[in-house]
Image (spheres, grey):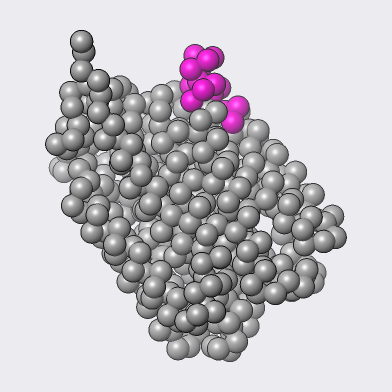
Amino acid sequence: MPEAPTATRYRVTALVLAAAVITYLDRVCISVAAPLMQRDLSLSQSQMGVVFSVFAVAYAIFEIPAAVLGDRWGQRRTMIRIVAWWSAFTMLTGAAFSYASLVATRFFFGAGEAGAFPTLSRALSRWFPVDARSRANGLMWMGARLGGAISPVLAVGAIALWGWRWTFAVFGLAGLAWVAVWTRWYRDDPAAHPAVNAAELDLIRVGAAPAPSRTEKLPWRTLLFQKDLLILCATYFASGFGFQFFVTWLPTYLTKEHGLTLERSGVYSALPLLAGATGCALGGLAADWITRRSGSLAWGRRAVAVTGFFLGALGFVAAISARTPEMAILCLVAASGLHDLTLPVAWATCTDLGGRFGGAAGGWMNLASSISGIMAPVAAAELAQAFGSFHPLFWVAAGMYVFGGTLWFWIDPRKTPGI
């Protein structure tokens, strides 16, 4: 009888999922601590908006260089550097003593975290066949949303016990623990892993793109100006604009516009991201199922992306009419969960289009999200100050989602830029 394939690739998924959880655990913690940080450091709402945005500025600046290093150095070495760096600056956030020191710390935190998701997605493309990559990316993004979902709850409890400063120190330790496991166990090339047998290796290599050589030049023009990838970047810009609200201003919105306590707003703030975790997992499963049933990779991914964007927009619009915190959070749960159906198909498509330089392609796409991440928190603060409500931002987010969903009709994941 033929040898059954081993299941080492699923352990890789578990490690990637854990990294994604920790990424958002560290990133979202500050949104819960924001009111206390504003009080202790005498920060205005606009200054706190800058603190949120400076992370995205650094993330945007270093995203492509860090992703290119992931292709050059390999995913193992790159993720060791990324996670150790961001964990250190998560811990240092708790030592901030002024507006300037907080801005500087969050800038370096963003610089360190840049390249994480392109590198992790490229790792999945090396460990999974082409018809399973949407599911694998769905699990990665499920982890990210779970991290975002549990962070408010954990942060509220930790802040009550230790204060916001020590909470950042404790959260940073989780990343250092992950680095120790990743360093010992993960291998870039499945063939180099002792737990992979020949049957699993044959399965993994279906549609796999090999790693580039260390001396091979990155084809910038071919990669960055490929039509489908450019359109994909535009959809990801639209995607990020709405999502930023959930990881920055949502607790403030619930406390100031619906009168919730900090503790209750922390619990409620977890729900949209928890819904997003479910959306990510289901989006990847649905896209791969439609692909197998229809025989069309393009329509398998396109159907899920368009549906997710359009229904997510309806969730934001519905939240504008909500009169109770329960109804508001229910609408925002729908906006988050339905939109996040789109994430696994976006990342699977991006790494497929990037071929051997899938990490660099992911960095290019994630740069678009980082740009919207720079704009969205500041825009939200200014709109809320001008109109006395975050509702104008909800209209903008809904419009962005409709724009992003429409663009998916022109994206063909079957095309590659010849690399």
Q: Relative to the observer, which residue lies in front, 391 or 255? A: 255
Q: Relative to the observer, which residue lies in front, 94 or 218? A: 94
Q: Pick out the residue farthest to the top.
A: 1
Residue at 63% of width from left, 83% of height from top? 44
The correct choice, above or below, for 180 with respect to 288 in the image is: below
Q: Position of residue 317 (x, y in %)?
A: 78, 49
The part of the chain drawn in magenta is: 288-304
Q: Relative to the observer, which residue lies in front, 188 or 147? A: 147
Q: Position of residue 33 (x, y in %)?
A: 55, 75
Magenta region includes residue 298: yes
Quadrant showing the N terminus? top left
Q: Tell me if 137 is positioned left or right of 311 in this view.
A: left
Total labels: the figure holds 0
Quadrant showing the C terminus? top left
Res 230 seen here: no
Q: Relative to the observer, which residue lies in front, 314 or 53? A: 314
Res 139 seen here: yes
